[in-house]
Image: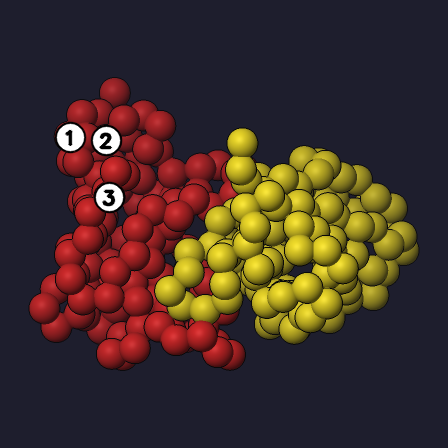
Chain colours: A yellow, B red
Amino acid sequence: DGGITQSPKYLFRKEGQNVTLSCEQNLNHDAMYWYRQDPGQGLRLIYYSQIVNDFQKGDIAEGYSVSREKKESFPLTVTSAQKNPTAFYLCASSKLAGGDYEQYFGPGTRLTVT
Amino acid sequence: DAKTTQPPSMDCAEGRAANLPCNHSTISGNEYVYWYRQIHSQGPQYIIHGLKNNETNEMASLIITEDRKSSTLILPHATLRDTAVYYCIVRLLYSGAGSYQLTFGKGTKLSVIP
């Protein structure tokens, strides 16, 4: 089955701890994205990567970091500097970056920080 | 600023066509209309997109008005599994900064009634 996997589905952390969210795709897509969704709200872009070893900040990158060492993987680290980390995190990928390529989403990770 | 306007909620009887409207009166000539849906606590699912011609795929039809200021997503025979929040998005056509992210608003919550 081709698709995007995110793990775990639910994650709980204590305030002050860094936490890394996993995102893997086997669609052979070059571009990958991380979004954040808060209750009742739309999605906001955190980071995106057009190609391996390259990534750019989105609208709300502060307090987050990413890496793209492999085409299939784009992990997101939520650092202790992120003031409101509790949210639903969604990873997506597309064949290439840009307007004519639809993005496919993973099932999401719900992070709760207390 | 919101680039699209959608009704917050709609009901549709099971088996009937669901017609979801979207207003995008400020759309420019180099922007697509995209539709996604999100079932509760899952990642968004791509449905369809178009530039100026009507489009149809196995999931839905997209009707774009001649002036491109509004569109309608049609689910021809709605089922209970179509209950979700539907997002209408405008997105830049070309590859480049500004075209990578999907800007989700609050969407339309469609409830399919048995």
Q: Which residue is mark 3?
A: B57
Q: Residues within 10 Å of mark 1 (few under 14, many from 20)?
A: some
Element marked by disc 1? loop
Please report, as a chain letter, where disc 3 is located: B
Left-right relation of B54 to B114: left
Which amino acid type is marked by label 3?
Asn
Q: CA distance from mark 3 to mark 2?
A: 15 Å
Q: CA distance from mark 1 to mark 3?
A: 18 Å
Left-right relation of A60 to B43: right
Locate the C terminus of chain B by quadrant. top left
Q: Residue at x 56, y 50 (%)?
A: A28
* Residue A103, percent from left and from top: 47, 54
Q: Nearer the viewer, residue A1 or A17?
A: A1
Q: Which residue is mark 2?
A: B78
Please report, as a chain letter, where disc 2 is located: B
| Furthest residue in direction front, as rendered | A28
* Residue B32, percent from left and from top: 30, 67
| Of labels 1 and 3, the one closer to you | 3
Q: Nearer the viewer, residue B93 or B101?
A: B93
- Sequence order check: which comes first, mark 3 or mark 2? 3
Q: Residue at x 71, y 38 (%)?
A: A7
Q: Which residue is mark 1?
A: B16
Q: Residue at x 37, y 64 (%)?
A: A100
Please report, as a chain letter, where disc 1 is located: B
| Of labels 3 and 2, the one closer to you | 3
**Marks 2,1: beta carbons within 8 A:** yes
Q: Is residue B65 above or below residue B14?
A: below
Locate the N terminus of chain B by quadrant. bottom left
- Sequence order check: which comes first, mark 2 or mark 1? 1
